[in-house]
């Protein structure tokens, strides 16, 4: 019986069923005794997906109708990559009842044919094609800066400036922003979401109090704004404790006014102290200048922030970090790793192009993202990144700072192998790609011999 069960388990696993399910089926059903049909198995609570597989093993499957196992087996036998196989299986299962075996074979043949046609030809200059495919539509982009639809007063760079920021691998974008998704009651309760926004948004003493210097007493006076403190949910004790943490002489008055004295009577030190007190962070995350609450299309409340601090936001209670995004790619690479940064480059570029109504194949953008992140860090496409690291002297010189590159190469005695596109164009010889990658030899035959 053990041998029979192991055969059943193996057969079921070959059809794509998980081992645990296959073992359960082998234990529950005795092949020699089972004579139930589809209806009886369904009535017994067996899922339809597994009913078809069981009937096929028993040799009592219904003819004509395409089974889940048929889809599984035929797709697995195809030459498609695993990701396409999984996607194809899920889509075919939905329309299974509308398929015949001939239609299934026809669909698989068509998909395989389209996949083969979509492959890049050997020796194709994919880099040049990608550059052309993004560069040409890029000339049609506007130079304006747009803001998020439906989000007031939070502006974000889009269009050509944003594309330049991405390919230059800027450490900090011109308009850093985050979309902070919430969870639990924070996502359903607007009041809680607003309280969380206030907790994240940076609050300096200048935002909740009037700060001015007094040359008469050589001190800095702080007048807390009680109305603003109440709105932001900050206690006066918090402000006092924060100021006292500076380890400077502090005097409190009954009306709540604070006086911070300098250690000497220097006017310059007084001005520095005033600036230091004004910029002191009372609450929030440094770098997030504003945080506003908006309702997402799925009905949940979320936060849009002006400024980005991905790592610090991840530690805030109520934040769903798995769905929180930022447009700062360098920060993504630092916090989540290089693969996440690669995906962010693709998403940001595709979203920017689509927002401008430009249709660029994602594979061109993917190639750029791969080239920028292949070494484990985000590198720019410029003389300090990919272009500056090329092995070809002429290719580097053709990009930027021509004289410096040629002089540096001459000093070190570098040799250019003339393997790329740019350097072959410069010297006026065929490019060793595409049709230029092969050499054809024509043999002359004697016409008399042929006759």
Image (tube, helix red, strand yellow):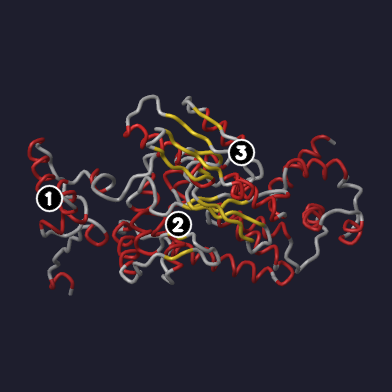
Question: Residue 95: in sight, yes or no?
Answer: yes
| Disc number placed over residue 155 in the picture, else none | none
For the point 8% across and 42% down, the residue is 407
Q: CA distance from mark 2 to mark 3?
A: 43 Å
Disc 1 crowd rating (10 Å Cα; few below 14, some 14-19, many 20+) is some
Residue at the spot of label 2: 348
Relative side of 110 to 167, left or right: right
What residue does disc 3 label?
Answer: 236
Q: Which residue occupies the foreground of this view, 229 or 70?
A: 229
Q: Earlier in the sequence, mark 2 or mark 1?
A: 2
Residue 209 place in picture, x, y as percent = 52, 44
- Quadrant where the C terminus lies? bottom left
Q: Which residue is mark 1?
A: 402
Q: Is residue 247 left or right of residue 450?
A: right
Q: Residue at x 72, y 59 (%)?
A: 68
- Look at the numbered disc 1 and give the secondary structure of its residue: helix
Task: Find residue 160 and report its horizontal and vertical position in percent.
Answer: 35, 63
Position of the N terminus, as image quadrant, is top right
């Amino acid at each position: 019986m053990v041998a029979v069960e192991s055969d059943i388990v193996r057969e079921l696993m070959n059809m794509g069923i998980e081992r645990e399910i296959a073992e359960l089926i082998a234990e529950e059903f005795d092949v020699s005794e089972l004579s139930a049909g589809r209806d009886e198995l369904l009535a017994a609570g067996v899922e339809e997906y597994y009913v078809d597989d069981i009937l096929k093993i028993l040799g009592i499957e219904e003819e004509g109708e395409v089974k889940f196992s048929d889809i599984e087996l035929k797709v697995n036998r195809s030459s498609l990559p695993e990701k396409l196989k999984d996607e194809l299986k899920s889509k075919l299962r939905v329309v299974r009842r509308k398929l015949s075996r001939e239609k299934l074979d026809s669909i698989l043949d068509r998909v395989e044919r389209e996949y083969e046609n979509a492959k890049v030809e050997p020796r194709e200059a994919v880099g040049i094609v990608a550059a052309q495919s993004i560069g040409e539509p890029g000339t049609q982009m506007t130079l304006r800066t747009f803001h998020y639809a439906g989000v007031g007063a939070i502006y974000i760079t889009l269009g050509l400036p944003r594309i330049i920021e991405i390919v230059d691998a800027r450490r900090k974008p011109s308009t850093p922003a985050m979309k902070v998704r919430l969870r639990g009651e924070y996502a359903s309760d607007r009041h809680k979401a607003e309280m969380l926004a206030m907790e994240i948004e940076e609050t300096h003493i200048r935002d909740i109090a009037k700060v001015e210097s007094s040359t008469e007493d050589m001190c800095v006076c702080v007048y807390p704004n009680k109305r603003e403190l109440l709105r932001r949910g900050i206690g006066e004790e918090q402000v006092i404790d924060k100021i006292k943490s500076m380890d400077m002489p502090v005097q409190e008055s009954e009306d709540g006014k604070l006086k911070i004295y300098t250690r000497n009577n220097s006017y310059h030190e007084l001005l520095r102290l005033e600036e230091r007190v004004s910029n002191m962070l009372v609450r929030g995350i440094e770098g997030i200048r504003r945080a506003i609450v908006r309702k997402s299309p799925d009905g949940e409340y979320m936060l849009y922030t002006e400024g980005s601090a991905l790592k610090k936001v991840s530690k805030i209670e109520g934040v769903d970090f798995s769905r929180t995004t930022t447009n700062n790619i360098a920060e993504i690479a630092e916090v989540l790793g290089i693969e996440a940064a690669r995906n962010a480059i693709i998403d940001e570029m595709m979203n920017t192009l689509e927002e401008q109504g430009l249709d660029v194949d994602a594979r061109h953008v993917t190639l750029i993202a791969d080239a920028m992140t292949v070494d484990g860090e985000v590198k720019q496409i410029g003389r300090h990144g990919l272009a500056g690291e090329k092995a070809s002297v002429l290719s580097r010189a053709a990009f930027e700072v021509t004289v410096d590159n040629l002089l540096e190469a001459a000093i070190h005695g570098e040799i250019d192998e003339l393997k790329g596109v740019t350097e072959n164009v410069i010297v006026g010889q065929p490019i060793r790609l595409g049709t230029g990658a092969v050499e054809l030899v024509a043999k002359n035959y004697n016409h008399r011999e042929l006759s």
